[in-house]
Amino acid sequence: MLNQELKDAVVARVLSKVRTPGQYVGGELNSVVKNHAEVLGTVCMAFPDTYALGMSHHGLQVLYSLMNDRGWACERVFTPLPDFETAMRAEGLPLYSLETFTPLSQFDVIGFSLQYEISYTNVLTMLDLGRIPLHAEDRTADDPLIVAGGPGGQNPELLAPYIDLFVMGDGEPSLPIVCDMWREMKGSGLSREEKLAKIAAAQPWAYVPRFYTPIYNEDGTILEIRPTRDDLPAGIRPCVIQDLEGSPLPTKPVVPFVETAHDRIAIEIMRGCPWQCRFCQSTVIKRPLRYRTVETIVEAALESYRNTGYDEISLLSLSTSDYPDFERLVTRMSEVFTPLGVKISLPSLRITETLKKIPALLQEGRRSGLTLAPEVARDDMRTQIRKPIDNKDLYEGAAEAFRRGWRKVKLYFMCGLPGERPADLDGIIEMAETIARIGKDVTGRYADVTASVSNFVPKPHTPYQWNGMKPREYFHWAHKYLKSRVRMRSVTVKCHDIERSMLEGILTRGDRRVAAVMEEAWRRGARLDAWTEYFDPKLWWQTFEDLGVDVPFYSQRERPVQEVLAWDHIHIKYGRDYLAKEQNRSVVQLEAMAGAV
């Protein structure tokens, strides 16, 4: 089924002109190649960022395995680096799938996995280079169905002009349904719009933007988002897997040829989070809490190891140490994999009493750094963000890790949260330096501690969705202040890029009026904005100015709770009333904090 002519052209005329050509040739271990004439349909999983990031994403491997096991030909495509895009355009060649070099325009379905809003322009690059009409309204019956889902699509309005159908919620049950319905209507004589309407009417989690129209007030706020058809609901509800244990894990993940962000096996042990941090979108959109059994996890990990040869296994969830049988799981994984020379990685550890037990649960082996996310350092701010942790647990856990061979600690914090004070920033440095000194007390040598500080961006579907984002001047001050407070050489403060955070602030809470700016910025050359070497903030701010879009209106304005938000028609499990109640409680707590200073 290989499109040999296109492959030969790429190899002969493009690959010698680009860096890391191995990411564009396919053929990796465990990749699946099928004859398109012998399958139910063809779907290409599109990750709107580089191969190095996309091949590290567990969800892509899950859907790839799932659709190939269902009798479809499921293939992959990633955003090319600018040198590859330029060379392909110069040679007049289309973007293609890695498995068969099939141009994107020849697939039945293209499925975009949206992980973060900064990747939106990459979607446009892939559609255009794949020779698919950019705007959904310009596509004909012969064009692929363009589907999108994932955490980066929780406010779908910026991509509304370009995506045919958004899948809200879990992709494992919903993507096969969409693909099968689209395939069954092939050759039916129905128009593209009629096909989309049938899916939208049948599935409460299928959002087709062309069937919903925003109505604006005179002041620019939204009056309502109105369905244009009587057979469609006013609100979209997420698709939810009730039985995660029954949802198969990919045990033959594709093994990349080139270095990627995470070269390891990933096993999702639990979906959802028992905590309700006010800043966190994931804990809201991934409810309810579901988990797999220890036996299923260990078995899948062992089979994946045999099929790949990786020497590291990562146990994934929003809060890994909250897995209900955590100690038995880690002990069992360590017993099975330490003799094989395989390291067990535990990201997303919650700071509880369990933390000090973890080093003892893992048998002796290679030690990497301990990564933890306190987010803030003072107790009253923890109450405000609803992340109740105890510094005693953090310090005891770090001490035990140092005793058992760990030497580095990375701490994740946020700055710019509602009600933040200089004392909160002081607390970040105090916590980092305290851990460094604990290392000295335990081992005789100060521990290397990195405090990674992100700039808070209020997200849709969180209690903070009505809050304004701090202006760039505040973040410049806060970053300078933090670095000026460091007194120990073994402590490093790393702050996220401010301009990228400011862009994220409008992309995450914008509406369809901002889509025109995004498209124009892309046409002016915006590419791979998550990458420092490609991100051009001046291009973006000039485009906003030229098109007359008020950035602070979207990102920095405090919004009343009663205001209709661009994503209000996308419902969550607990509903908008829950978020409003939490926001109102937050306001009361902020007033108490201010009064105590």
Image (cartoon, rainbow, N blue to C red):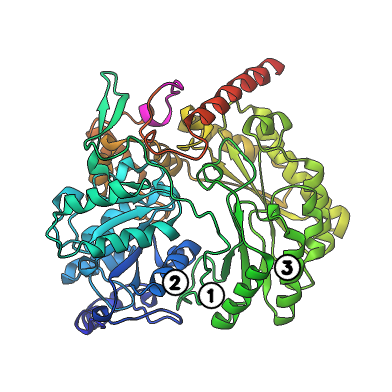
Image coords of residue 5 (percent x, y): 19, 83
Return the residue at label 1.
251
Which residue does the image show at 24% across and 74% down from the upper left?
102
Relative horizontal placement of residue 5, taking residue 370 as reference (left or right): left
Q: Is residue 152 magenta?
A: no
**Mark in front: 3 vs 1:** 1
Q: Looking at the picture, does residue 263 appear above or below residue 171?
A: below
**Residue sitting nearer the eye, 457 or 204:** 204
Q: Nearer the viewer, mark 2 or mark 3?
A: 2
Question: x, y (%) of residue 213?
Answer: 24, 34
Across and down, in percent, residue 10 comes to: 24, 78
Q: Which range is magenta?
A: 553-562
User: What amino acid is found at the position of numbered circle 3 in the picture?
Assistant: Arg
Q: Considering the numbered disc 2 on the image, is that residue within a helix, a strand or a loop?
A: helix
**Residue at 77% in and 50% down:** 436
**Contact flag, marks 2 and 3 (Cβ < 8 Å):** no
Q: Callout 2, which amino acid?
A: Ser
Q: Which mark is residue 65?
A: 2
Q: Callout 1: helix, strand or loop?
A: loop
